[in-house]
Image (tube, rainbow, N blue to C red):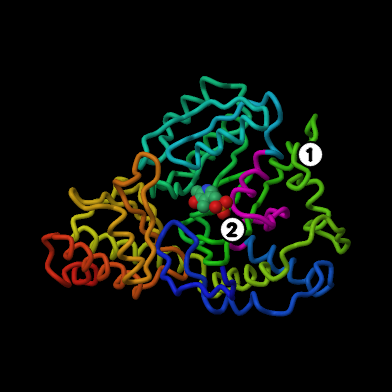
């Protein structure tokens, strides 16, 4: 086979991530590579930490990007905090809660599961009951924004309960950071990880994390070594930590961090609250249009994420046919259903740079045309009219 340059098609990314990366971020990526211990690079690292503290709404000194995707941020939290024998309450209302269970077990911890239906928020009352039944639990782990179902959980209430029972929290904010209200310090969250390719609209492959003093105290007083050399905070912080002296730990993805810095700068320029509001208002428009197309939203009102809309596919419509046509005819990617929702639901993302009025319009028009072609009883133009009424 003849090989040549890879030129990707120009897609509009409205799935569960990655989301559209703006030209500004792509331009930053292509600037000249410098050394990862260059004083100018250290200056950039310090700025990234500050911008990240803003994005997370935290003063935590240990706030940094892990050089690997969101899953590595997840592992960073678990391997540093969970010691063999630790009891961890794990809330599971979708795919990512299931991964938390995997993490706890691999760390030698014991998981107590709090299960909720797919498409629903974590039930705070069940968390309370689990904490009362397990006074020896040390950690509560939960997903703020479940990307597999489009449900948002009450991170503030869960963290408050955890504190009352002297537990730390491990919180997945991969999809919420930048898109939904998230206040690490005000809500008292302890170990929090995220990703760059969802509402921050940066390239995939970096995972921002932040640790409270309480979390670090547990990590620093472990009786056993962290089983991962790469993710051991004691070692990584020699490079990312405070102070002028930075020692080699691994070679940071220098250009990726240029891009990440740019995306955080864009968030700061827009303003966090404005970004949250933009996601919410365009979500409402999208839903108004999708409803006209006969699609019903899975999570009940009050438990819906703005940036990830899970909707049931109408009876008689084939999932793969529609997504295939959207990609082939419109260069538009929407997400398939996962787990219980495979073949039954779509996940339509409105994340970061992809969360625009133009994209809402484009998605509704494209989907409407395909559905009409497949025999849906919808009047052409009705979805956009409903959305922007
Ligand atoms: C995407 C996602 C992850 C995993 O992030 P990767 O960058 O794919 O490793 C974890 N949790 C949630 C909620 C996600 O949406």
Q: Quadrant of residue 191?
A: top right
Image location of residue 105, percent across then percent down? 62, 29
303 to 242, vertically: above or below:
above
Magenta span: 54-78
Q: Position of residue 223 (x, y in %)?
A: 80, 29
Split into 4 quadrants, where in the image is the C terminus? bottom left
Name the residue that disc number 1 marks. 220
Name the front one of labels 1 and 2.
1
Of pointers 1 and 2, the one earlier in the residue sequence: 2
Q: Position of residue 204 (x, y in %)?
A: 58, 61
For label 2, the SS is loop
Near mark 1 (Cα within 10 A), the count class, few <14, some 14-19 or many ≥20, is few
The residue that appears at 50% across and 28% down in the rendered structure is: 113
Density class for disc 2 (Cα within 10 Å; few <14, some 14-19, many ≥20) is: some
Residue plotted at (57% across, 32% down): 164
Q: Is residue 68 magenta?
A: yes
In the image, 142 versus 147, the foreground residue is 147
* Residue under pointer 2: 57
Q: Residue at x 63, y 77 (%)?
A: 28
Indicate whether 116 appears above or below 177.
above
- Helix or strand or loop: what does disc 1 sit on? helix
Whether residue 343 is visible to the viewer of this picture, yes or no, is yes
Q: CA distance from mark 1 to mark 2?
A: 24 Å
């Amino acid at each position: 086979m003849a090989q040549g340059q890879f030129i990707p098609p120009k897609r509009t990314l409205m799935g569960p991530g990655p989301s559209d990366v703006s030209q500004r971020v792509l331009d930053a990526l292509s600037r000249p590579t410098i050394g990862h211990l260059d004083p100018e690079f250290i200056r950039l690292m310090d700025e990234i930490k500050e911008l990240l503290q803003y994005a997370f709404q935290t003063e935590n000194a240990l706030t940094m990007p892990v050089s690997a995707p969101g899953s590595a941020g997840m592992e960073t939290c678990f391997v540093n905090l969970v010691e063999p024998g630790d009891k961890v309450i794990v809330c599971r209302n979708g795919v990512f809660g299931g991964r938390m269970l995997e993490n706890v077990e691999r760390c030698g911890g014991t998981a107590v599961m709090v299960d909720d239906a797919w498409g629903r928020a974590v039930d705070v009352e069940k968390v309370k009951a689990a904490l009362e039944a397990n006074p020896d639990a040390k950690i509560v782990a939960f997903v703020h924004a479940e990307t597999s179902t489009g449900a948002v959980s009450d991170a503030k209430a869960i963290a408050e309960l955890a504190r009352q029972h002297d537990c730390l929290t491990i919180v997945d904010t991969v999809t919420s950071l930048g898109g939904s209200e998230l206040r690490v310090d005000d809500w008292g969250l302890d170990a929090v990880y995220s990703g760059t390719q969802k509402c921050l609209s940066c390239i995939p492959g970096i995972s921002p994390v932040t640790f409270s003093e309480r979390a670090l105290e547990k990590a620093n007083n472990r009786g056993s070594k962290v089983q991962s050399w790469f993710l051991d905070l004691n070692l990584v912080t020699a490079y990312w930590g405070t102070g002028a002296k930075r020692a080699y730990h691994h070679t940071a993805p220098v250009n990726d961090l240029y891009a990440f810095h740019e995306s955080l700068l864009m968030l700061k320029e827009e303003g966090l609250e404005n970004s949250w509001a933009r996601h919410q208002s365009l979500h409402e428009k999208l839903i108004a249009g999708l409803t006209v197309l006969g699609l019903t939203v899975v999570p009940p009102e009050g438990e819906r994420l703005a940036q990830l809309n899970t909707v049931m596919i109408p009876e008689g419509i084939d999932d793969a046919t529609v997504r295939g046509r959207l990609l082939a005819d419109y260069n538009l990617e929407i997400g398939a259903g996962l787990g219980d929702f495979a073949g039954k639901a779509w996940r339509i993302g409105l994340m970061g740079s992809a969360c625009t009025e133009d994209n809402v319009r484009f998605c509704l028009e494209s989907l409407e045309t395909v559905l009409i072609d497949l025999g849906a009883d919808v009047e052409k133009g009705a979805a956009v009219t409903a959305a922007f009424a």
